[in-house]
Amino acid sequence: LIQLYIPLNFLGVMYREIRQALTDIERMFGLLKTNREVEDKPDARDLPEGPLGVRFASVDFHYEAKRQILFGVDIDVPAGRTVAVVGHSGSGKSTLARLLFRFYDVSGGRLEIGGQDIRNIRQHSLRRAIGIVPQDTVLFNDTIRYNIEYGRPGASQSEIEAAARAAQLHDFVARLPDGYETRVGERGLKLSGGEKQRVAIARALLKNPPILIFDEATSALDSKTEQAIQAQLEAAARGRTAIVIAHRLSTVMNADEILVLDGGRVVERGQHAALLSRDGAYASMWALQQREAAEQAA
Ligand code: ATP
């Protein structure tokens, strides 16, 4: 058995090393502001300071020519509002976020921020305007302070603390013997999924972007954690234009508008109560999740 264990253990170490290397590469891309898919136009402009609305106008998109992913998607998020996108796995939700960051250009229609087609905006300015709380936050093998400060390198300790407080992370950090200097990640303190997400929220809040994308984790959470995340999300979205990519419908009940995406098409839109009374796709997703929650609780 020991003969089997040693190579397996070695593989585990290798895996962690490779993952960290990938994180570092991701960071490097961020720092170098490189983009492999699209380029700035010579006359591209910066976004203005202040609140910015987001609009998808009849957006079509394919990664590969033979397989279209989005079909005539219309989304309007006025400045300061929250729009939630729900839909089954593979319906195209995360693709919307990738387009907003302009990792790819739309195949048809247009995507606007602050009323400007994003193809006319300098990418540096575009990415500075958008913060993302990803599904699975990969932390750097470094201190909690470093992991938050990454949102805005050079931020002061009091700014870092303020972001951590807003993300409901500060009290947890303050109780650790080394506080903000605690090392986390694969070689340090292992944080739970909820704690990692709070680091990601603090990072995004420190960046202080006018637009926030919240890509909710798919993993099942107990209802207490779910409520805590719901509260954090609402705090993070306050005063910003927010797009919430949601897997749990309970997270999006208070959104200004909810869109149901199915096979790359918006099939329903409206507020929670109105969508329930329509008795369509949203209502059946809701009924299913309620049943699952009741089964889990039993
Ligand atoms: P989930 O809820 O599982 O995260 P999603 O609704 O966010 O799913 P997307 O990640 O937007 O779905 O993917 C939509 C479709 O696009 C999927 O069918 C997926 O296979 C395809 N897709 C995603 N990324 C690529 C890529 N880089 N190249 C080709 N196809 C892709």
Image (spheres, rainbow, N blue to C red):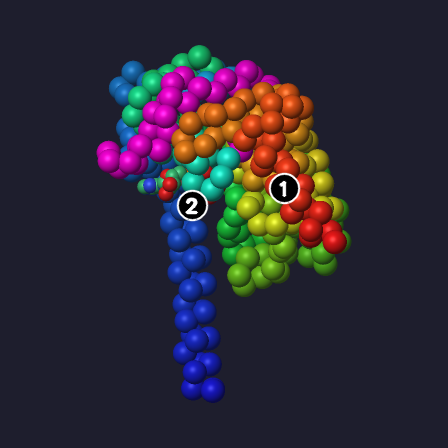
In this view, the residue in front, 81 or 278, is 278
> Mark 1 is on which residue type?
Gln
- Furthest toward the front, the residue is 279
290 displayed left or right of 7: right
**What mark, if any, has residue 151 been given in the picture?**
none
Q: Main secondary structure of the magenta part?
A: strand
Tell me what residue is drawn at x 69 percent, y 51 percent. 295
Q: Quadrant of residue 270?
A: top right
**What mark, if any, has residue 289 been given in the picture?**
1
Residue 275: horizontal and vertical position, in percent? 61, 24
Residue 274: horizontal and vertical position, in percent? 64, 21
Stretch of the chain drawn in magenta = 57-86
In this view, the residue in front, 175 or 62, is 62
> Mark 2 is on which residue type?
Arg
Q: CA distance from mark 1 to mark 2?
A: 37 Å
Question: Dot 1: what SS?
Answer: helix
Give the crowd class for mark 1: few <14, some 14-19, many >=20 residues within 10 Å. Answer: some
Q: Earlier in the sequence, mark 1 or mark 2?
A: 2
Give the crowd class for mark 2: few <14, some 14-19, many >=20 residues within 10 Å. Answer: some
- As displayed, is residue 150 above or below residue 192? above
- As displayed, is residue 286 above or below residue 23? above
- As displayed, is residue 180 above or below residue 31? below
In the picture of the structure, the residue carrying the numbered disc 2 is: 27
Question: Dot 2: what SS?
Answer: helix
187 inside magenta stretch: no
Q: Is the C terminus in the top left, top right, bottom left or bottom right quadrant?
A: bottom right
Tell me what residue is drawn at x 44 percent, y 36 percent. 91
79 inside magenta stretch: yes
Residue 241 in view (yes/no): no
